[in-house]
Amino acid sequence: MHHNPTVTPSSKEFDRPDLYINRELSWIEFNRRVFEEAKDSRHPLLERVKFLSIFDSNLDEFIMIRLAGLKDQLAAHVISLSPDGLTADEQMAAVRQRLTPLVREVHHYWLNDLIPLLAEQHIHILNYEQLNKAQRNTMLSYFEREIFPVLTPLAVDPGHPFPHISSRSLNLAVAITGERFARVKVPPTLPRLVPVPVSEENPQTMVYVWIEQIIAAHLNMLFPGFDVLESYPFRVLRDADIELQEDEASDLLESVEQGIRERRFGSVIDLAVNPSMPPRIRSLLVDNLEIAENDLTVIDGHLGLADLMELYQLERADLKDPPFIPRMSAALRKEQNLFTAIRERDILMHHPYDSFNSVVDFISAAAHDRQVLAIKQTLYRVGSNSPVVNMLLEAVENGKQVAVLVELKARFDEENNIEWARALERAGVHVVYGLVGLKTHAKAAMVVRKEEEGLRCYVHLGTGNYNATTARIYEDLCLFTCRPDIGADVTELFNMLTGYSRQHAYRKLLVAPIGLRPCIAERIEREIRVQQEQGGGRLIFKMNALVDPEIIHLLYRASQAGVSIDLIVRGMCCLRPGIPGVSENIHVRGQVGRFLEHSRIFYFGNNGNEEIYLGSADMMQRNLDNRVETLFPIEDPV
């Protein structure tokens, strides 16, 4: 039954800019929380180094996607304002104003806090000039043996055009006598931190030196006959968004491949240099990379701290969190038939606390069970060596009908997914790439099994990817069920993804882009009515991001009505809590910790008849309107 809201979600009442937090600035505050974890002395030391690496990796992606998007808006003279009332130009300025001191603080903390703390634990991160003569001789041998053969010095003069600088690459700008200039790319295939042998008297001591400093110390070998005056590191980030005209593409896979090739040549968004770089070389880079002066980031420290993840690989268990061993679900014990267990009751799992092996076992059981006729699955980010995909390949060999939707447009996983799509196609799997113009983000697997009573559908629905590697560090929830109504919904979902079906009404699932937004809106409206009629309205949402203005409007209206609202948002949150008369009944908490919070949970009090949905969708316009997403209900009592 549909109820017309007393005030429409697009109410002018909530169009005031002061009611919203800027999306980009909210993201920066999320990444600041990641940095706060690096500063938290309660964490083991290498965990803190890991968080610093994650901070820098996150920042790279933010610059390549979000800042690039703002620059595109500027270039296209887009005049629309963000919900908080800023133009693209004003947002760029606000981002730089917020980022500059934060990045400075991060590098200062690495140099002045974490490096000394590592030294106390006998892990010495040295600059090349700190090495003694014996160590330098060892590094000379390493340079000649491991580095020199893979270096390609590229001169820049009228006969040698300025070379292509790939995104995220570390480079040396080399000044040579006669105002000559050359570029040397630091090989990304070699370790950034090179181990330096130490004396046998100190077996516990580890010494590392930066590879770019080893290269810089031996540049005369690359330019014999010339005097190398100095070298300066620099690093470039390019626009990484792939733009596809899907409705015009005859082959989506080829179109995505072309997009990946073009991404290599995306416009430069950020150039990072050290303060020691002289103005002449700085200007030469700015001119040839075709950037503005304010796209230049001056960093007093080591460029590309994402590479510090190398240190986390050290075998120093005393400097890491205790190993975490996921438990195997009692309901899915090896000795019990997995399908029998699911028939007995729905099974809810919480990764990584519950082992992801149960999901792999589900696909494996389906691949080898004689009664299984068909397997259908969505794949978004599966990783490079995927046990799930290997089981699907085995299923085909065993004569099962296998249909897989591979989402080619999963950002930064495109190449990986293309490889898997081709491998699956070669094996005889029915592979589709989804609906034109929509990214398929839903996480679903369905097994059709022939049983005495007829065909039965066994379903796995989740909040996270079918990726055995990230499942160890991502917090996610999933459900195994064979409820007929959910099975029928998932069957129709796959028919929509693989054929021309356009299902609008589902029995149990909430599915974007058709029904998810109105279903969430109706349930928030229902909570408002409950509150107005007898009190006790209650909403609890957990998600990665809350950005969508219409959903925020509805939550403001619910707060005004007195509904008690708790929001747990890991990343961006544009809703501003605690505003008198608007959002004083909304409490927001960000959550960053050992595991990456990835599950989405939506709880509706419903006057005691509680509803809980889990799923793949955040409250963002792209998830609600431009993707295939699923939320599924939890109905079996614990």
Image: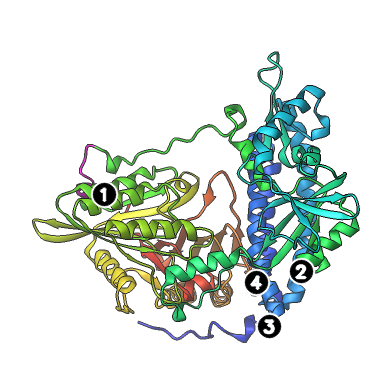
Q: Considering the image in quadrants, where does the N terminus appear?
A: bottom left
Q: Which residue is mark 2?
A: 290
Question: Tag 1 or tag 2, which sits nearer the N-term?
Answer: 2
CA distance for labels 3 and 4: 11 Å
For mark 3, what is the residue?
Answer: 78
The part of the chain drawn in magenta is 335-342
Note whether 470 is above or below 139 in the view shown.
Answer: below
Labels 2, 3: front one: 2
- Amino acid type, label 2: Glu
Numbered disc 3: secondary structure: loop
Identified by mark 1, the residue type is: Glu
Q: Identify the residue under disc 1.
A: 394
* Among the 4 quarters of the image, the one containing residue 254: bottom left
By secondary structure, the bulk of the magenta-drawn segment is best described as helix
Q: Residue 576 placed where, x, y %?
A: 65, 68
| Residue 515 part of the magenta-drawn span | no
SS at circle 4: helix
Which residue is the site of mark 4? 69
